[in-house]
Image (cartoon, grey):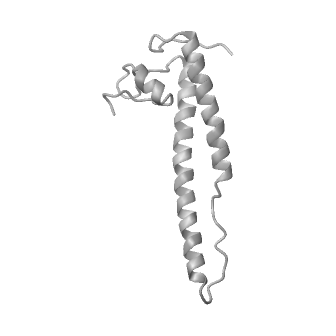
Amino acid sequence: MIYCYLYTLDMTQEELKKYKESLEVNKKEIEELIAKTPLVEDMGSDTEGTSFDQEADEAEAMVNNNAIRTTLKEKLTAINKALEKIDQGQYGKCDKCDGEIDKETTEAAPESCICKNCK
C-alpha cells in the first residue's frame, strides 16, 4: 500500500508509523472487548417469588453492558477515522477548522480529530 502524506503536522515517517501502530493495537483491543461484552443479558422468565431482585440485577447489567459497548464503538469509530486519515495523508488535521492538531493532543489521544481550539 502506498501512503501519501500531504498534511501530517510536520511528522516524520517514524512518528506516523508509531501512531498508526498504536491505533491498530488499540483497534484490536477494542474489537476484542466489544466481542467479550455481552449485548443482552439473559433476562429469563422467572417472575415468581424473590426473583425480582435477580431480574433487576440482570436489567442493570444489560444497561451497563450496552453503555460500555456504545462507548467502545464510538472509540473504534474514531480510531478507524484516524487510520483512514493517515492513509489519505490528512492525519493531524482538525475536522472543524482544518488547522493542525498539536502533538500534545496527538500523543495523548492518537484518534483525536479535533484541535484544542475547536473542542
Q: Quadrant of residue 2?
A: top right
The residue lying at 58 percent from left, 12 percent from top is: 14
Q: Is residue 73 above or below residue 97?
A: below
The residue lying at 59 percent from left, 86 percent from top is: 50
Expressed as whole percent of the image width and height from the top left, the position of residue 65 reads 57, 58
Q: Is residue 58 visible?
A: yes
Judged from this view, the residue extending furthest toward the left is 117
Q: Is 99 placed left or right of 78 in the picture?
A: left
Q: Is residue 41 above or below residue 68?
A: below
Q: Is residue 107 above or below residue 61?
A: above
Q: Is residue 48 above or below residue 88?
A: below
Q: Nearer the viewer, residue 82 or 96?
A: 82
Expressed as whole percent of the image width and height from the top left, the position of residue 97 reads 34, 24
The residue lying at 61 percent from left, 90 percent from top is: 49
Expressed as whole percent of the image width and height from the top left, the position of residue 60 reads 53, 67
Q: Quadrant of the C terminus?
A: top left
Q: Is residue 87 visible?
A: no
Q: Quadrant of residue 116?
A: top left
